[in-house]
Amino acid sequence: MAEVADRYRRLSDVFASRIEAVAPDGWDAITPCPDWNVRDLIGHVVEMNQIHLGLVGRKPRRGPTVGEDPLGAFLTTRDQAQEDLEDPAKAAVEFDSRFGRWSFAQAIDRGMCVDLAVHGWDLSQATGQDDSIDPDVLPYLWRSIESIGEEGIRFGFGPALDPPADADEQTRLLAYLGRRA
């Protein structure tokens, strides 16, 4: 479980730094998720953290709203999830998911970590930031996506696109998740 806590910390730190770098006029920029602007995208990530906490009976902490303080809202839910991942008993609490019986740590690893990496890319695209995904994380992302299965991935992401023949691994992954890189 320490590996999951470390991965979540690294990915959420990158996501937080990308939120911090949003220019004052960047909150309404449209993301690669066409129905979401930057603030909506951050709201989705905050909400997914809250949902995962709720699945194991934890009440999300009160903090600022995304409308008031996008970074503060993200950090509030991120910090709570991180603390729970670092507590072996809390990380091991199980629930029945649409994919079978999962622990809190498994749900964060297969759901939130993928969201942080991919939506971090979305956020960077919308705000003109470096959109690199750590190449060391890409094999993990593929494994997580495969563990969820095609139906699960399509539920959360758009239809797969054909990447260019000479696409690098990040571009292939993003195309599989319905994004043009």
Image (tube, rainbow, N blue to C red):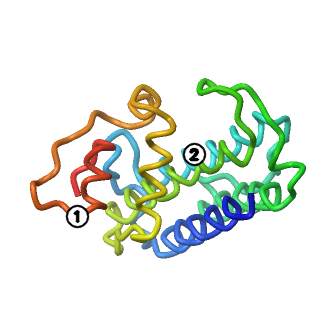
Mark 1, secondary structure of its residue: loop
The three-letter amino acid code for the residue at tag 2 is Arg
Corner quadrant of residue 131? bottom left
Q: Quadrant of the C terminus?
A: bottom left
Q: Quadrant of the N terminus?
A: bottom right
The three-letter amino acid code for the residue at tag 1 is Asp
Tell me the distance, in whole angstroms, between the alpha carbons under discs 2 and 1. Answer: 23 Å
Residue 87 versus residue 43: which sits nearer the camera? Answer: 87
Q: Position of residue 67 (x, y in %)?
A: 59, 53
Label of residue 110 in the image: 2
The residue at the point 79 percent across, 57 percent down is 80
Q: Position of residue 169 (x, y in %)?
A: 28, 61
Q: Residues within 10 Å of mark 1 (few under 14, many from 20)?
A: few
Disc 2 vs disc 1: Cβ atoms closer than 8 Å?
A: no
Residue 129 versus residue 171: which sits nearer the camera? Answer: 171
Label of residue 168 in the image: 1
Farthest residue, direction right: 89
Horizontal side of 172 relative to 103 (left or right) equals left
Q: Eyeballing the image, is 62 above or below 5?
A: above
The residue at the point 27 percent across, 48 percent down is 179
Mark 2, secondary structure of its residue: helix
Q: Eyeballing the image, is 155 above or below 16?
A: above
The residue at the point 48 percent across, 57 percent down is 140
Horizontal side of 74 relative to 53 (left or right) equals left
Q: Residues within 10 Å of mark 2 (few under 14, many from 20)?
A: many
Residue 26 versus residue 130: which sits nearer the camera? Answer: 130
Corner quadrant of residue 28? bottom left
Label of residue 40 in the image: none
Q: Position of residue 19 (x, y in %)?
A: 52, 67
Q: Upstream in the sequence, badge 2 or badge 1? A: 2
Q: Position of residue 143 (x, y in %)?
A: 47, 49
